[in-house]
């Protein structure tokens, strides 16, 4: 994959290998940022995965927030000593995670969610057995304990939301003879990983049922609809809908109460990422939303809030791209042969313009806005310069902003 800048002076080539590096690095970044900013009265218990022979220990440093005293946290001196630290809005707060390291609760009618305060997922108890969605390594063996708390039925089906290991990397904890269901692109990515690895025990089980568009899992009177609308966060990322429970799950797109994971949650297709908000709201009747990350469940209001956030980001990115001129930055830097220095100063200036526009409205509304806004601004402004679809979307945003 290769991107070329529309900037007349430069062709920007970012190889896909950089993206591959960004995934683990940004994961580390957000975790370290969270841990760093949550010192003081906030107590963490590290959720050490108990899986024997665990191959995803690099994902295990995700901490579990066991207690969180927001008022004392906000009042601490530590909280004002770092410019990236901002009070966490009430909207970002979730339930307290018990000392055992996870929380399991019924959403409705035998559909449960399980969370460690950083990741979450859901499972459905049917007459014949349990349908488990995903297997985040940060929850790991606690997923089995959570299921055993509410039923003694066997786990018969596993659904992968998408191929990312931080969501399905612990799927080896499930019975080998279970039915594993995923989109065909998810299966293809896991098979590619098998072909590349020297240790295939690190790869989650290959799906036994795959499909290109839609699949309905019907067991007794329980139903899960698995729907694919094209690339968004990554190829194969599904919308998983439980109609009886009016619950929609879509992972790594919408983050209830928080801004997304860095760089628009490393969306591989930003136009598809934007469209997924509309699809969620327009195509599904749901009361409960499961996003795969962070502190709490969501609702349609959370999806609408992030839709508004993304719409604002489009306008802020379009404004920054039009207001910051590369030639002005080049004059400020002066004579240099260092092309990347010039470009880094340019993207810093674009980012700063976009961040200032966004923070005034969103810093107090969504968790992590101050810490991560520059990553979201970079993702949207850069895509707006080089990606035809996102460029078109930003042009529309500019027109809308001008009309207001
Ligand atoms: Zn993902």
Image: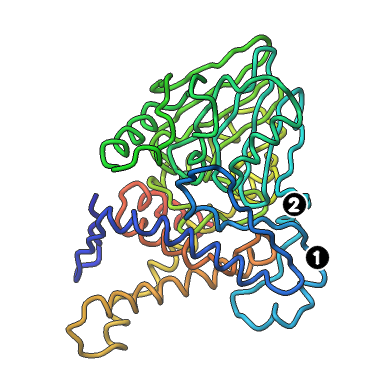
Residue 311, how many percent across, how many down? 53, 52
Q: Circle 2 sits in a helix, a strand or a loop, which is it? A: loop
Q: Circle 1 sits in a helix, a strand or a loop, which is it? A: loop
Residue 170, how many percent across, how many down? 51, 39
State the residue at coordinates (38%, 74%). Answer: 324
Q: Nearer the viewer, mark 1 or mark 2?
A: 1
Which disc, if any, is residue 251?
A: none
Q: How many marks?
A: 2
What coloring was used for the rendering? Answer: rainbow
- Residue furthest to the front: 52
Pointer 2 residue: 94
Closest to the observer, 116 or 173:
173
Q: Decide if residue 278 is on the left or right side of residue 6.
A: right
Residue 149, how many percent across, how many down? 75, 32
Which disc, if any, is residue 69?
A: 1
Q: Quadrant of residue 222?
A: top right
Looking at the picture, does residue 84 appear above or below residue 128? below
- Is residue 106 shown to the viewer in this render? yes
């Amino acid at each position: 994959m290769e991107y070329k800048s529309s900037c007349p002076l430069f062709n920007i080539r970012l190889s896909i290998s950089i993206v591959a590096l960004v995934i683990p690095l940004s994961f580390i970044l957000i975790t370290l940022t969270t841990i760093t900013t949550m010192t003081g009265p906030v107590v963490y218990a590290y959720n050490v995965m108990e899986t024997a022979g665990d191959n995803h220990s690099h994902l295990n440093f995700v901490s579990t927030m066991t207690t969180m005293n927001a008022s004392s946290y906000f009042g601490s001196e530590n909280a004002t000593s770092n410019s990236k630290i901002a009070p966490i809005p009430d909207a970002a707060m979730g339930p307290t995670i018990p000392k055992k390291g996870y929380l399991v609760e019924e959403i409705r009618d035998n559909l449960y969610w399980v969370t460690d305060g950083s990741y979450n997922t859901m499972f459905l108890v049917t007459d014949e057995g349990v349908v488990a969605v995903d297997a985040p390594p940060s929850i790991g063996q606690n997923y089995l304990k959570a299921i055993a708390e509410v039923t003694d039925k066997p786990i018969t089906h596993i659904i992968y939301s998408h191929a990312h290991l931080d969501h399905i990397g612990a799927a080896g904890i499930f019975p080998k003879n279970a039915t594993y269901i995923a989109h065909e692109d998810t299966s293809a990515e896991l098979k590619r990983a098998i072909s590349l690895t020297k240790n295939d025990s690190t790869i989650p089980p290959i799906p036994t049922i795959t499909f290109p568009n839609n699949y309905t899992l019907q067991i007794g009177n329980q139903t899960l609809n698995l729907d694919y609308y094209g690339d968004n966060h990554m190829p194969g990322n599904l919308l998983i809908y439980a109609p009886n429970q009016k619950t929609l799950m879509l992972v790594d797109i919408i983050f209830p109460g928080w801004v997304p994971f860095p760089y628009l949650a490393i969306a591989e297709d930003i136009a598809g990422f934007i469209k997924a908000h509309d699809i969620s709201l327009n195509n599904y009747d749901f009361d409960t939303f499961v996003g795969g990350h962070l502190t709490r469940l969501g609702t349609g209001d959370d999806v609408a809030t992030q839709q508004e956030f993304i719409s604002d980001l489009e306008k802020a990115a379009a404004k920054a791209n039009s207001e910051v001129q590369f030639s002005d930055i080049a004059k400020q830097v002066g004579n240099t042969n260092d092309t990347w220095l010039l470009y880094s100063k340019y993207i810093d200036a674009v980012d700063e313009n976009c961040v200032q526009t966004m923070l005034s409205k969103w810093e107090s509304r969504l968790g992590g806005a101050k810490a991560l806004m520059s990553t979201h601004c970079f993702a949207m402004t850069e895509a707006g310069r080089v990606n035809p679809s996102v460029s078109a979307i930003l042009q529309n945003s500019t027109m809308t902003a001008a009309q207001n």
